[in-house]
């Protein structure tokens, strides 16, 4: 298990840590005014700002560069906001650390590359820094966790994960596929690592930032990283997903913040007991169904019948989807469940017929 300490001190466990600031540092005036407005909300701990921006095209705005580090240190002094910058190379780290900036994040385009992450980890050896690591662009939890192991091996203990969805090629409402189950799996497998959510990049559109942030909070994330800009319409990068500071403050005030307190309740325990009973029944029925699938496979083998029977499969889907609709079960869930059930039945029949 990776030894983890808090990336930043929290005054209360009842409110998520908030990291906010512009996608990129464009000018001193833009960065300072955004920081000033955010400081007045008294909501933000870390001021995120892209000094160096990895862009798809060399013709896109890629940040103000090293000069912006000076602005961020002045902001820290003037507004008591800790600056946090993206680092993708050891040179980025060296320049930021030399300027006295000690909080960083590693972007999804970097975290997918073990060589790049190892170089950054080696450069952090012996330094008192805090590192937030975004999930790789591809859905690979082991690769993501391996990044934390690399930093842990050089003695970095202040770390946090940042969830921002995945590139899957699927057409969908958001820019990236949320794949919320991956977030749940990460939290289950690596309980020691605090997890933030970046709803701005996941959404790609400010219209959806609040609903994604709320979903993440319901999944018990430790904080949010949200892009804010003094004038989003004039932003030089990611203008569609950045919030104005006033919209950011209003959004935070509208969010339902689940309590972190552990509540003991006989009523809740009763509900959980009922869930356990139903789950037990479901698995017993699934076992019975697979046993029947096995017997069907024996019959098919004896009569040289193919496993896959499309007409029968379509008949089952039609019946069960209609039943699901009547029972208030979403079609999306019903289809996914039936697909998994069918795949498992085919594997069971394959195994039986190969004997």
Image (cartoon, helix red, strand yellow):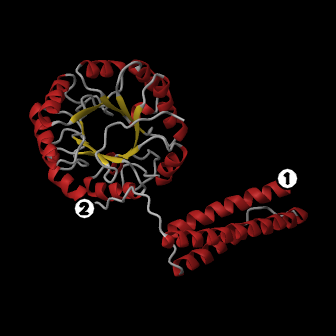
The residue that disc 1 covers is 354
Question: x and y percent of residue 93 in the render?
Answer: 32, 22
Circle 1/circle 2 CB separation < 8 Å: no
Q: Earlier in the sequence, mark 1 or mark 2?
A: 2
The numbered mark at residue 254 is 2
Q: Nearer the viewer, residue 56 or 90?
A: 90
Question: x and y percent of residue 345 in the render?
Answer: 73, 62
Residue pictured at 48% horizontal, 41% vertical: 192
Q: Determine the image quadrant of residue 172.
A: bottom left
Question: x and y percent of residue 250 in the render?
Answer: 19, 58
Residue pictured at 15% horizontal, 32% vertical: 75
Q: Is residue 330 visible?
A: no
Q: Determine the image quadrant of residue 318.
A: bottom right
In the image: residue 183, left or right of residue 278 = left
Q: Nearer the viewer, residue 97 or 345?
A: 97
The quadrant of the image that shows the N terminus is top right
């Amino acid at each position: 298990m990776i030894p983890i300490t808090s990336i930043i001190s929290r005054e209360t466990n009842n409110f998520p840590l908030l990291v906010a600031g512009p996608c990129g540092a464009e000018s001193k005036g833009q960065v300072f005014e955004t920081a000033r407005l955010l400081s007045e909300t008294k909501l933000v701990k870390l001021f995120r700002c892209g000094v160096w921006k990895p862009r798809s095209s060399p013709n896109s705005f890629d940040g103000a560069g090293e000069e912006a580090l000076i602005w961020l240190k002045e902001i820290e002094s003037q507004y008591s906001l800790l600056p946090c910058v993206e680092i993708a190379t050891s040179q980025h780290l060296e320049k930021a650390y030399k300027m006295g900036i000690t909080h960083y994040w590693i972007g999804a385009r970097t975290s997918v590359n073990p060589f790049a992450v190892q170089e950054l980890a080696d450069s952090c050896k012996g330094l008192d820094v805090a590192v937030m690591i975004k999930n790789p662009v591809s859905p690979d939890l082991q690769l993501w966790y391996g990044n934390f192991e690399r930093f842990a091996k050089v003695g970095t203990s202040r770390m946090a994960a940042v969830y921002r969805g995945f590139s899957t090629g699927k057409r969908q409402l958001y820019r990236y596929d949320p794949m919320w189950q991956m977030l749940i799996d990460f939290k289950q497998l690596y309980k020691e690592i605090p997890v933030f959510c970046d709803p701005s990049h996941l959404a790609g559109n400010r219209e959806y930032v609040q609903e994604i942030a709320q979903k993440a909070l319901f999944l018990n994330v430790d904080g949010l990283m949200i892009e804010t800009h003094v004038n989003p319409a004039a932003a030089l990068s990611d203008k569609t997903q950045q919030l104005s500071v006033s919209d950011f403050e209003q959004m935070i005030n509208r969010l339902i913040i689940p309590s972190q307190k552990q509540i003991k309740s006989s009523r809740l325990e009763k509900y959980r007991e009922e869930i356990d009973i139903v789950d037990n029944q479901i698995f017993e029925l699934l076992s019975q169904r697979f046993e029947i699938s096995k017997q069907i496979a024996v019959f098919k083998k004896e009569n040289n019948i193919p496993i896959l029977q499309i007409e029968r499969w379509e008949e089952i889907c039609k019946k069960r989807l209609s039943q699901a609709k009547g029972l208030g079960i979403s079609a999306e869930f019903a289809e996914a469940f039936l697909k998994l059930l069918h795949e498992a039945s085919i594997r069971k029949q394959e195994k039986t017929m190969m004997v």
